[in-house]
Amino acid sequence: MKTAVVIGAGGQIGRPVVQALARDGWAVTAASRGGARDAAWDEGVRSVRLDRADGTALAAVVGDGCDLLVDVVAYDAGHARQVTGLAGRIGSAVVISSVSVYEDGAGRGFDTMGEPDGFPDYPVPVPETQPTVAPGEATYSSRKAALERELLARGAGLPVTVLRAGAVHGPYSPLPRELYFVRRNLDGRRDRVLAYRGESRFHPASARNIAELVRLAAARPGSRVLNACDGQAPTVAGIGAAIDAVMGVETRTAHLDGPPAGSVGQTPWSVPRPVVCDMSAAERELGYRPVVSYAESLPETVEWLTGVLHGRDWREAFPLLAQAYPDLFDYAAEDAWRTA
């Protein structure tokens, strides 16, 4: 039986990765900060506690070696060196990166979104050959770029698949974009406003589809960089309609032709230009086919969000989302806009 170690096993992506590999016949060691407290695994999955920053502890978890190392939470060049330093003890690796590493021909990327005309103008769809931001330590995107460069530069003796994930969705998310529609529906808000005519597209990536890509890459070790997204990139209006259908509600939508008016019309998908990734390389190299569509994935996400929100303030439940979008549910501003 082939052996795998999954780092970050208790999180949004790690959970379905462990499950997918176990179903495929791998003997999996699920490593996370909380160990067995983070998830209840089926028989045959071993839980261990691991602080990702502790390279000595990571080496101890790998022990005498494993066939596959999956790193869901690798963040920078230092983490990459920890992985490549184990090259003699692991057969191959799969590491999660992000589509935020891409930049357009004018040097714009996710790091310039807040600047005037700073939103990138990517090709549709974005291939893996699109230029990336300079590696560094200053931002999430530059640190992910440094992670990738270090893995691919130093990994000559270690087959490493880098998966650039899109807007990850599914249960256990620290940044659940679907909350925008779910909470509004739970609050009885049947009217909504969407910027950019509701046509914004920000390519989603189901954690289950990412897990499928990990499973396929594990069976075909190699050094490659692949986009990791769903089969389709729905518009924000389409996402809202799909969530309404799951929750059994009817809503009315007003549209802004351009950007949000302050907080009015803003959603976690509201972008002035599309971010849609090319998945043909994954299809060609790994035989990738999404295991779930965006709409098919929603019932479990909606159920999880509803349970988490029960009796809790959304800011307490999802502090990362609240930090990124503090005015996400500014109903007073929306009502004032409607009556102006």
Image: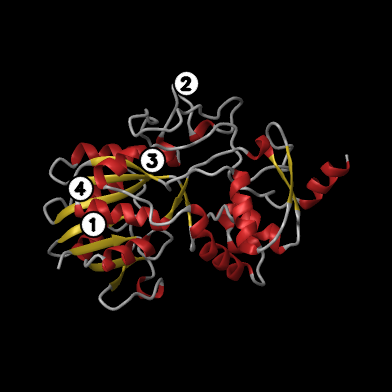
Check residue 143 in the rendering and tell me which mark sits there, or answer none: 3
Asked if the residues shown at circle 2 and circle 4 are in contact, with their CB atoms under 8 angstroms apart, the answer is no
Type of residue at label 4?
Thr
- Rendered location of residue 164, percent (x, y): 37, 43
- Rendered location of residue 104, percent (x, y): 45, 26
Which quadrant does the C terminus fall into? top right
Type of residue at label 1?
Leu
Check residue 69 in the rendering and tell me which mark sits there, or answer none: 1
Q: Give the quadrant of residue 266.
A: top right
Check residue 106 in the rendering and tell me which mark sits there, or answer none: 2
Query: Which of marks 4 and 2 precedes in the sequence?
Result: 4
Q: CA distance from mark 3 to mark 1?
A: 20 Å
Q: CA distance from mark 4 to mark 3?
A: 17 Å
Type of residue at label 3?
Arg
Query: Which of marks 2 and 1 precedes in the sequence?
Result: 1
134 displayed left or right of 186: left
Q: Which residue is mark 4?
A: 84
